[in-house]
Amino acid sequence: MEPSGPEARPAKVGHQPEASLAWASVTATAKRRDEPALDEVGATESRRKGSADLSPVALAAGTPTRSVTQREGAQERSAMRNIGLDLGAKKISFCEVRDGKVLARRTVSVHSALDDVLGANAPKARVAIEACREAWHVHDELVRCGHEVKLVDTTRVKKLGIGQHGRKTDRIDAEVLARALESGHIPEAHVLSPHRRALRTHIMVRRALIEMRSQTVTTIRGIVRASGKRIGTCTTEAFVGHYREQDLPDEVRSVCEPLVQVLATLEPQLDEIDRKISQLAKHEAMIAFLMTAPGVGLMVAAMFVSVVDDAKRFTKAHHVESYVGLVPSEDSSGGKRRIGAISKQGNGYLRALLVQAAWTILKGRPANETETPRLSDPLRVWADALAQRRGKHIAAVALARRLAGVLWAMWRDGTVYDPDVVGRASASGKTREAQSSQLQAAAIARATRKAKKYLRSSTPTNAEVSA
């Protein structure tokens, strides 16, 4: 006898199990109430938020057969691609990642070889680039093509996994950047404005010329000392004339003559680059404001503007001081606080200029009666008190740190340096103080005279070259 009951009846073709019937009932009920069906909720929410991403997974439980699309979801590509670029000195590594998987890799020698995947006609992409020499140029080119570019902070790339397990190649770095971009863990770096880039480039050229001149002078002095002679102390600008006045053996002059010719060529080039920097500084109104601070000349103010770029991207002075590496390093753990030397992060040249400006405040005297007396300036008084307790070298670095904060506050508030305000701020913690137009005009006039004096002399901060 054949078994009876519902469990013995064979399923008819097209018959749906209870799960499918329940799902159909829910969908029908939602439609009767003029509400979206459950399988449309995700799409409706996505449209409401304005996002364009992958379609939801198809719900087809209980059907006789299930396709690949129903098992894995829709297979179209996301609206934005995630790409990592590692810009090497000779090669550029390209890596595209989607859903945690590498879609494409490529290694090229020039950026233009990636026009088919990153050109103006390529699908739009998010691109991660580690900050380096050519990063700004590549950034501008990709933005011009309509891509979204993320410049990665090089001081924090190790947190992404670059260099882990002792393996670091351009190919691996590009993949790590692409994966971090897809997961949303990119530590972004600030992108300088084009005008500030030009200003910094000219300052770097001037720095290279100054270093070349100093090295050449040192070499000539060493050769002369090796012959038993000495060249007296003088400024670097007057060194060539001072050298020619010396009574030196002919063989020494013949050896030093090529170096003297180099110095003679460098001087007009330095004058020219100084004029270019001065022209660029005229388009930066804040440089004149910053030059009203004691010890701050054209180069210090211009370099500060070219590095900070935008005062509003910092919330307080301590952040600026940390950005230029003038805050103490710290290694505290287990309830013990260990404070070390300054961190020396950020732009090293700006940090050196600020320290030199601090030494100018500590050692300098007013050039004439119209300038602020530096001996009674609150910054000088504060630094002198610190020098008595900790020594002048520590006081100079601490003063450089405080000077960076003062310059940022002047930029933030659009004010000139006022020693009375600085003194009251030190005592009461005030950060903002209204200034009269007369005070600003007088301070700007002093800064203008300071800039003209600098252009006439073209004297660097370390003008004196010892024998």
Image (spheres, grey):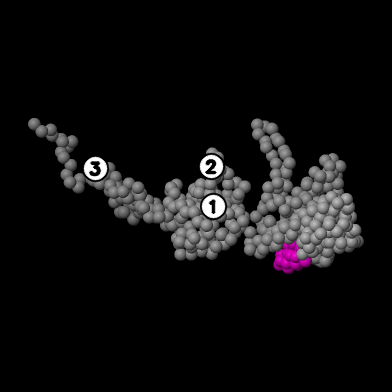
The kind of residue on which mark 2 rests is: Arg
Q: Spatial distance from mark 3 to mark 2, Cα to Cα?
A: 54 Å
The percent position of residue 263, horizontal first and vertical second, equals: 79, 61
Q: Residues within 10 Å of mark 2 (few under 14, many from 20)?
A: few
**Which residue is under mark 2?**
167
Q: Earlier in the sequence, mark 3 or mark 2?
A: 3
Q: Which mark is residue 17?
A: 3
In this view, the residue farthest toward the left is: 1
Q: Nearer the viewer, mark 1 or mark 3?
A: 1
Viewer-closest of 78 and 51: 78
416 left or right of 24 in image: right
The kind of residue on which mark 3 rests is: Pro
* Mark 1, secondary structure of its residue: strand
The percent position of residue 116, horizontal first and vertical second, equals: 45, 61
Q: Which mark is residue 104?
A: none
Tell me, yes or no, whether the two marked residues, 3 and 2, touch with CB atoms within 8 Å: no
The percent position of residue 415, horizontal first and vertical second, equals: 76, 60
Question: Is residue 337 something one can see in this rendering?
Answer: yes
Find the magenta span and give its range.
266-287
Q: Nearer the viewer, mark 3 or mark 2?
A: 2
Q: Earlier in the sequence, mark 1 or mark 3?
A: 3
- Our reading of the magenta stretch's main secondary structure is helix
